[in-house]
Image: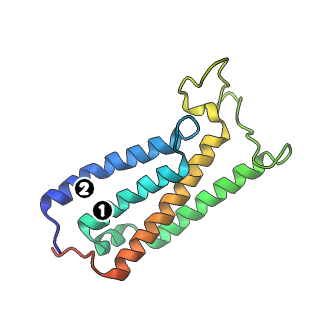
Amino acid sequence: MRMSKIVRTMSSILILLVFTFGLYVIMHGHMTPGGGFPGGAIMASGIALLVAAFGSSAIQKTLKERYLAILKSSGLLIFIGLAFAGIGTTFFYNVLVGSPIFGHIPLSGSNPGDVWTGGSSTLMNIAVGIIVSAGLSAIVLVMALASGGMEVEE
């Protein structure tokens, strides 16, 4: 099945918007509903959009399963490192909140919308987003390759 030039062009444009929105959901997860899992799922849906538009073999040429495994492992190492960073106090202690770089605490009231007020929870959201986006993208890619039905004829 050949996707039209319109579908492929719009997919190339929309992928930037999908990834930007996924990053937004990941980065603002400590202030709004969202976080690493839904943001990573949004980013993986962008990969599914590319697979549907261009075919699984074309996407596999640039997005190898090995790279996704490296990304997923890196996200896990970041998450585990942040979990053990506060082990002197307690496991998963937010060691970066209140530090000058990663999170001044708002004086009173609600969060003013500053991304870094979450301390290490923001970095944990990023790590979970990497894990989920790489894992779900690998699943989408493997399923598309196994089905053989997502090939685009040039």
Work out which residue is located at the far top of the displayed protein and give it. 108
* Left/right of residue 85 with respect to residue 67 in the rendered view: right
Quadrant in the rendering for residue 31: top right
- Please tell me whether mark 2 sits on a helix, a strand or a loop: helix
Locate the N terminus and report the quarter of the image it occupies: bottom left
- Please tell me whether mark 1 sits on a helix, a strand or a loop: helix
* Left/right of residue 106 with respect to residue 85 in the rendered view: left
Residue at 79% across, 49% down = 91
* Left/right of residue 88 with respect to residue 37 in the rendered view: right
* Left/right of residue 75 with respect to residue 152 in the rendered view: right
> Depth check: 81 or 37 in front?
37
Where residue 93 sits: x, y (%)? 77, 43
Q: Would you say the residues marked 2 and 1 are in contact, meaning their CB atoms lie under 8 Å apart? A: yes
Q: Amino acid at mark 2?
A: Ser
Work out which residue is located at the far front of the displayed protein and give it. 33
Mark 2 vs 1, N-terminal side: 2
Residue at 56% across, 48% down = 126
Q: Amino acid at mark 1?
A: Leu
Locate the C terminus and report the quarter of the image it occupies: bottom left
> In this figure, which residue is indicated by the disc labeled 1?
50
How far apart are labels 2 and 1 at the CA level?
6 Å
Q: Is residue 72 above or below residue 89?
A: below
- Crowding near the residue tagged with mark 2, few <14, some 14–19, many ≥20 C-alpha atoms within 10 Å: many
Residue at 18% across, 59% down = 7
> In this figure, which residue is indicated by the disc labeled 2?
11
Where residue 25 sits: x, y (%)? 47, 43
State how many labels appear: 2
Quadrant in the rendering for residue 63: bottom left
